[in-house]
Amino acid sequence: MTLAVPTDDFDCQSCGACCSYSEDWPRFSLETDEELDRIPTEYVSADLGGMRCEDNRCSALDGKLGIHVGCKIYAVRPIVCRTCMPGDDECLMARHKLSQKVLL
Ligand code: SF4
Ligand code: SF4
């Protein structure tokens, strides 16, 4: 089987692993109230503390994991989503988990 996420290609638009890593990941932190108000409520978790996820996948993630994805709220996404950089430790962890899932 072909890995959905190539190990040497950090193209976020063909990945999405960090956006489907854990419901505990896209949580709000230092956003201002104004910034949070810009995120449509349909994508916000019931406890208002982060993004709403389904099976660890952020509800604002569009598309097919490992093929082509996009963030529906890219311009107003939370801080944690802005700080995760392609190739950093969190990215590698998320991609590894996704690769394992695809292989199972
Ligand atoms: S930051 Fe890493 S895990 Fe997240 S979408 Fe980009 S390549 Fe994938
Ligand atoms: S808000 Fe956008 S960038 Fe952040 S986890 Fe959800 S889909 Fe990914």
Image (cartoon, rainbow, N blue to C red):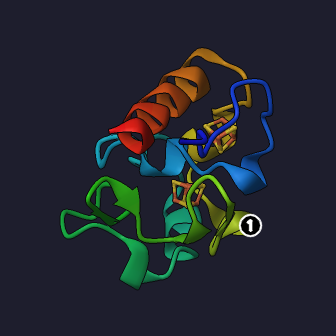
Residue 82 in the image: above or below residue 59: above
Residue nearest the observer in this picture, 36 or 60: 60
Q: Position of residue 50 (x, y in %)?
A: 36, 56
Return the residue found at the far left. Answer: 47
Q: Is mark 1 within 8 Å of ligand 2?
A: no
Q: Relative to 85, is 80 on the left or the right?
A: left
Q: What is the x, y in percent for residue 48? A: 28, 64
Residue linked to disc 1: 75
Relative vertical location of residue 89 with respect to residue 57 in this rendering, above or below = above
Going by the numbered disc 1, the residue's amino acid type is Ala
Q: Residue furthest top?
A: 89
Q: Is residue 75 above or below residue 14?
A: below
Quadrant showing the C terminus: top left
Q: 100 or 89, which is in the foreground? A: 100
The percent coordinates of residue 90 (x first, y second) are 54, 24
Closer to the camera in the image, 68 or 80: 68
Across and down, in percent, residue 22 comes to 33, 43
Q: Secondary structure at mark 1?
A: helix
Ligand 2 position by quadrant: bottom right
> Which residue sits at x=38%, y=84%?
42
Residue at the spot 53% in from the left edge and 42% down from the top edge? 1
Judged from this view, the residue extending furthest toward the front is 1
Nearer the observer, 101 or 71: 101
Task: Give the residue at x 58% y 75%.
Answer: 38
Place residue 72 in its image quadrant.
Answer: bottom right
Tell me: 92 left or right of 85.
left
Local crowd at mark 1 within 10 Å, few (<14), some, or many (≥20)?
Answer: few
